[in-house]
Image (cartoon, rainbow, N blue to C red):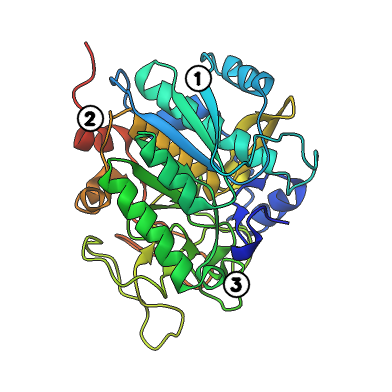
Amino acid sequence: MSPFPKYQVRPYFKLRNISSIAAHAAHVAGDAPVAGPWTLPALCAAYDWPTGLAGGGVIAIVELGGGWVQSDMDAFFQSINQPSPQITDVSVDGTQNSPNQNVGSPDDPDYEVALDIEVAGAAYYAATGKTATIRVYWSQDIPSAAQKAAADGCDVCSISWGSDEANWGNAAAEQMEAAAQAATAAGMTVFAAAGDNDSGDGGQTPANVDCPSSCPHVVACGGTNKTSTAETVWNDNPGQTNGEGTGGGYSTVFPVQAFQIAAPPAPANTQYGNGRMVPDVSADADPNTGYTVVVHGSPTVVGGTSAVAPLYAGLFASFGTKLGFVTPKLWASAAAFNDITAGGNGFYNAAPGPDPCSGLGSPIGVSIAALFAGPPKS
């Protein structure tokens, strides 16, 4: 059971396994082999990560269950020739770092926790050459965790847990948005995973968006399948609206946002939402092209949009402190992203320009850094 059952919130990670590899192989063109996983330094390099930035941003990570152990962190960062970051646990409401739940289960939240910390820390180090300062906020409630992180002065916040807006209901979703708006006003940039169950997001209809990523003051992070030569929308179950693939669509709670320049409107005559488009940005999330991390003492390949939120959090923490509400500038700077034009998430398809599968696209790290960071150190 989710540690936040009221809203049926769940972590958005996916393990790479034989069935997912087979599903992917069944729909790739020709007989090309399925791409292998990425190490974090290699993925950052593929996304033209900046280097030598001053950094200084403190990274908050919201977790609702599971836990981490130092030995996993040390093994992971040693494997990529980086020092381990400084990690501090903060209990918001009595919830604690509690590792080793359901070891071996695909629902084990320890995978989520390790993925979040390791991706954020490695992405930050790749951009700065410095160890990240990471604070893990343990809570049964996402809004209160984000509020606590902002009050503590954190500069970026990564949230990899969520649920269909219908599970939250309007009042709770608006409470989440109020927390995110207050956090960005205090200078904290908030990123959240867009979901891992295609356009249906695990809901009762073919198209639903995920909260908190649907909140206007949250940067919604969608997923792609990225190889060394191509990048498409992540969807391992094409033709389905509730398989394994990136979330995305239009909110039923929050209206269209003026800052989403050139975002396509929702299809006419649909009852599945016509408000804010999700996601804003995207990056590699398919477990078939996933991230090699260390969990329970072993290297493991993990994907999901829950990897994308900490990837962007680590990048933005490298830009400095108190950037706040960055989303309008991102939408005014589409050239800072790789446009994803192929694939779909069930109900929606990618197209040139922004779309409700991949948003603006995947990061061109140096171009995004030019928008927010000072010049690299000499």
* Camera-nearest label, 2 or 1: 1
Amino acid type assigned to the residue bearing label 2 in the image: Ala
Identity of the residue drawn at 66% across and 36% down? 301
Which of marks 1 and 2 precedes in the sequence?
Answer: 1
Q: Position of residue 187 (x, y in %)?
A: 27, 40
Which of marks 3 and 2 precedes in the sequence?
Answer: 3
Task: Identify the residue under disc 2.
Answer: 373
Which of marks 3 and 1 precedes in the sequence?
Answer: 1
Disc 3 residue crowd, few under 14, some 14–19, many 20+, Cα 10 Å: some
Identity of the residue drawn at 62% across and 33% down? 114
* Camera-nearest label, 1 or 3: 1
Q: Position of residue 214 (x, y in %)?
A: 41, 62
Task: Identify the residue under disc 3.
Answer: 203
Task: Identify the residue under disc 1.
Answer: 86
Q: Quadrant of residue 175?
A: bottom left
Q: Which mark is residue 25?
A: none
Residue 349 in sight: no
Q: Position of residue 251 (x, y in %)?
A: 41, 71
**Image: 273 above or below 151:** below
Disc 1 residue crowd, few under 14, some 14–19, many 20+, Cα 10 Å: few
Q: Position of residue 139 (x, y in %)?
A: 57, 45
Q: Which quadrant: the C terminus?
A: top left
Identity of the residue drawn at 56% across and 64% down? 198
Nearer the observer, 59 or 194: 59
Q: CA distance from mark 2 to mark 3?
A: 39 Å
Amino acid type assigned to the residue bearing label 1 in the image: Gln
